[in-house]
Image (spheres, rainbow, N blue to C red):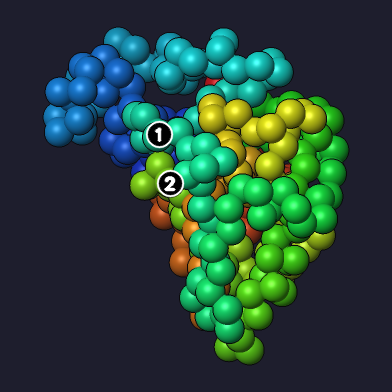
Amino acid sequence: MTKDVNPARTAGGGEDGRGTPVGRRVVLGMLAAGAAGVAAAPFLQSAYDDTLGAAAQKDPTGLSGLLPGGGFRYYSVTGSVPEKTARTYRLTIDGLVRHRTSYRLADLRQLPQTRLVRDVQCVTGWRVPGTPFEGVRLAALLDAAGVRPEAKAVRFTCFDGAYSESLTLEQARRDDVLVALRMQDKPLSHAHGGPVRLYAAPMYFYKSAKWLSGITVTDHVQPGYWENRGYDIDAWVGRSNGRDDAPTT
Ligand SMILES: Nc1nc2c(c(=O)[nH]1)N[C@H]1C(S)=C(S)[C@@H](COP(=O)(O)O)O[C@H]1N2
Ligand SMILES: [Mo]
């Protein structure tokens, strides 16, 4: 088993905010500059790099303390995310399926629910042991949609308008991959990606796309947001380029 740090991760930037001016650094710049900072964010990023770098890596948004159930860090690659309610939320399943489907929250709640209790592991090192997640098996939604024979992968999109993730079809059909409606035995809060997020239990938490709005069945894996920035596509905990022994950032 190797734990090589992918060169792209350190040289090209990563979830821990080093390197390329993307993601959390941009968020930091926007927080520092307010709404007017959106267009100028890449510039502000470098300006704030040195002065706020250390603090940014501890808590890039300053919101961690607001999250219930200590130990979690709030992550969003965008500055703010609209809230969706049971009335406005939709999850669309499309692509290489026989039946394009749109679920409301109530529809998802009526399907059989699976509860898993596993450790949450972020690729930057923090971990939250024994966290219950509950929701519908992704495999059940794929079966209901009728996956076409040429399909190979699944792409996930989010109503934050920026994040995406991917799984192979084989991974997506595992029984420990959920379209999660509950976390820690409560409805998923907005901060944790509610009302619905992906939960890919055996993989680093960046696979678990928050604010899930689209599931598209595809004929090849389309790398997700962090994967385009150097993280492994197959994000098995302990077997990919995440450092599960890394100090908490
Ligand atoms: N839409 C979206 N999903 C996302 C992210 C994000 O920035 N946007 N960050 C990922 C990462 S890196 C982690 S560690 C977890 C954090 O989940 P939390 O905010 O509930 O702790 O969400 C993952 N899913
Ligand atoms: Mo993460």
Res 204 quadrant in image: top right
Measured in 3D between alpha carbons, the distance from the residue under mark 1 to the one under mark 2, in whole angstroms, is 8 Å
Q: Which residue is mark 2?
A: 159
Tag 1: Cα neighbours inside 10 Å, few (<14), some, or many (≥20)? Answer: some
Residue at 26% over, 23% down? 30
Name the quarter where the C terminus is drawn: top right
Q: Is residue 205 above or below residue 17?
A: below
Q: Is mark 1 within 8 Å of ligand 1?
A: yes
| Rendered location of residue 223, percent (x, y) | 47, 61
Disc number placed over residue 198 in the picture, else none? none
Q: Is residue 73 above or below residue 99?
A: above
Look at the image and tell me whether residue 43 can be seen.
Answer: no
* Disc 1, SS: loop
| Rendered location of residue 171, percent (x, y) | 70, 65
Q: Which residue is mark 1?
A: 81
Res 101 quadrant in image: bottom right
| Rendered location of residue 197, percent (x, y) | 60, 44
User: Which one is nearer the viewer's eye here, 12 or 182?
Assistant: 182
Residue at 82% over, 55% down? 112
* Disc 2, SS: loop
Residue at 54% over, 27% down? 191
User: Which amino acid type is marked by label 1?
Assistant: Val
Asked if marks 1 and 2 touch (Cβ < 8 Å), the reply is: yes
Q: Is residue 75 left or right of residue 124?
A: left
Q: Is residue 214 left or right of residue 108?
A: left
User: Which one is nearer the viewer's eye here, 37 or 192?
Assistant: 192
User: Which amino acid type is marked by label 2?
Assistant: Phe
Look at the image and tell me whether residue 164 can be seen.
Answer: yes
* N-terminal label among 1 and 2: 1
